[in-house]
Image: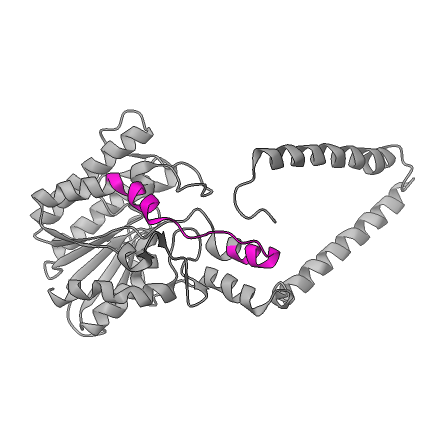
Amino acid sequence: MYAVGPVSDIEIAILIGVIIILSYISWRFVEGPFRTRKIFPNQKSAIFAGGAVIFASASIGVILILGDGFPARFSSEVNRVLAVKADNLELSSCGILDAQANHGLKVCQLGADTKGQPTFAVWGDSHGEAILSGINKSAKLSEMKGVFIGRGGCLPLLGVHQISPEYVTCVDAADTFMLYLSEHPEIEKVILISRWAIYAMGKRFGNEKGHTVYIKDMETVSPSLEENKRVFARSVERTFDKLSLLEKKIVVVAQVPETQWSIPEDSARAKLLSIALEFRPKINDYLARQAYVTEVINKSKEKYSFEIVQPHKEICTGDYCMVYDDGVPIYRDSNHITNAYADKLSKIFDPIFAIL
């Protein structure tokens, strides 16, 4: 709980030693006396004591729930930092793209609340949802109407999915979206947004917590980190081919910088413990992390004509990319920006709608 950042090998060794000592104490003074009935010699007294402990524990739990965890135990500054964890965009006009399908693909209205059909579509994963507020604001300013279609964990690419069973239907979801586009010729532009590097590279950023991500397509024989790159490149080619056949203009939104910290929680802990840590990722680390994705996208740009939006040019200055804005985190975890900061990024999308 108090470790802000990765735990070192020495700290792990110390903790294992402490665990052994505590285990012995527990066995010697709790388990042993209960087994030999030195404590609570009969069943009735044991049941009464157990019931009293359960009642006391439940009462404390109820009090904590009613008190909302008693946030007053932290300073207003710490609570302000922690509050951004819940800063998500909640779109009221959302439904399921295909009610018959079982792939959870959301469709939400964006932009101007006007009559007529949408003229643009945003296709993305959870990173797409995280930055939607900025797109929504920019589209409204340009009086453009659009839709967001996507699902967390599903790449906005054709014929590809994470190897985890819950993402197998991502392929069907992408095909459903293509069918939707073919049935809506009035949609002129498709904006692709994703956490591209996690899929292409597989590994997490720095010491970020989480499992390795493997992706596959129909050509994959054995998933691996190297195969991730090949799958990613094939999927980009496959997707751009299809969108070009449908005569859609393509916009690729580059990934926002990742961090290796859960910014609200870790920076709040650092404030509580008065620990000075550098939470900002370095721009060079971001660029190195995106190198393969950039290579694939730039190569595709030679064949297809499309626009690229680069949020990092607003987020990063000098050697670092910021994680705070006006004293408040711009991330609600290690890689998703907050709704409030997405709003501030809206200007980077203005050129998209100016030439729609």
Asked which quadrant contains residue 274, the reply is bottom right
> Residue at horizontal 9%, vertical 43%?
302
Q: Is residue 186 above or below residue 221?
A: below
Q: Is residue 16 above or below residue 88?
A: above
In magenta stretch: residue 247 = no
Asked which quadrant contains residue 67, the reply is bottom right
- Residue 243 x %, y %: 13, 48
Image color mode: one colour
- Residue 334 x %, y %: 43, 51
> Residue at horizontal 13%, vertical 55%?
183
What residue span does the magenta drawing correspond to? 267-292
Which quarter of the rendered picture does the C terminus lie within?
A: bottom left
Q: Is residue 84 or residue 64 the one in the foreground?
A: 84
Q: Is residue 321 or residue 208 the one in the foreground?
A: 321
> Residue at horizontal 81%, vertical 53%?
52
Magenta span main SS? helix
Asked which quadrant contains residue 214, the reply is top left
Q: Is residue 191 or residue 2 the one in the foreground?
A: 2
In magenta stretch: residue 285 = yes
Drawn side of residue 191 relative to residue 81, left or right: left
Q: Is residue 331 or residue 278 the one in the foreground?
A: 278
- Residue 216 x %, y %: 28, 33
The reply to whether residue 76 is in sight is yes
Q: Residue furthest front?
A: 318
- Residue 137 x %, y %: 27, 69
